[in-house]
Amino acid sequence: MLIASNNRYTSSSLHLRPREAAPAEPKGVQPQAPKDGFSKDEQQELDRWNERNRFDMGELKTPPAGQTDPEIENARGYVSDVLDRVAGDALSKRGLELRLEIYSGDVPQAALDDNMYGEQAWKEQHPDKPWPVRAWLGAPDDSKAPIYRMAINLGMLRALETEDELAFILAEQAEILLDHDKRDPNNEELL
């Protein structure tokens, strides 16, 4: 299942034109989770999730909780639609929990991540509480399936000139993910 926003994936009618540049990183807009309503531990977990790929991909512009710039959300909707067209059926058939994320990095990159150490650590420290990331993403807490993250940064979106180029990159990432899931359905090895 593709998780493209804080809710389950639904097709978006928001599109960038194929040759339009990716949105510039908004000045002064920093995704911030609302501090009210989160426990200290939940805030730390949100910060950990947001920092996970920062070194390689840049700042996470689409956090699981908190505000996202509307232009970035439109870009994610467009990328989600393209991913759905090239691999949506295969991903849905496998029942994968997939979160599409946009990062700020300038060097063109796309990546996959399946490190579920955070969930394991949370459950060890808080055995009586569900992992908050699953709730923020709308993923079932009782699921044993990992939450895969497909990351693409603004540098990649700016570098691509056509929707076909984006479709190729996304199809390649989806193929890697589907192959990993087929070989390692229990996700015992890192992707």
Image: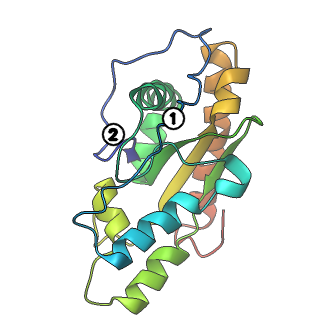
In this picture, is 112 found above or below 107? below
Residue 152 found in image quarter: top right
Task: Work out how far the residue at label 1 is from the one at label 2, CA to CA, in angstroms.
Answer: 13 Å
> Percent position (x, y) of residue 31?
44, 46
Front residue of 40/156: it is 40
Left or right: 159 with respect to 174?
right
Q: Where is residue 90 shown, x and y percent of the image? A: 48, 41
The residue at which mark 1 appears reads as 87
Q: What amino acid type is highlighted by mark number 2?
A: Tyr
Residue in the picture at 42% in, 28% down = 77
Return the residue found at the far left.
37
What amino acid type should be assigned to the residue bearing mark 1? Ala
Instruction: Between label 1 and label 2, give the one nearer the viewer.
Output: 2
Q: Quadrant of residue 181?
A: bottom right
- Which tag, 1 or 2, sits closer to the chain's start? 2
Which one is nearer the viewer's eye here, 177 or 75?
75
Residue 139 in sight here: no
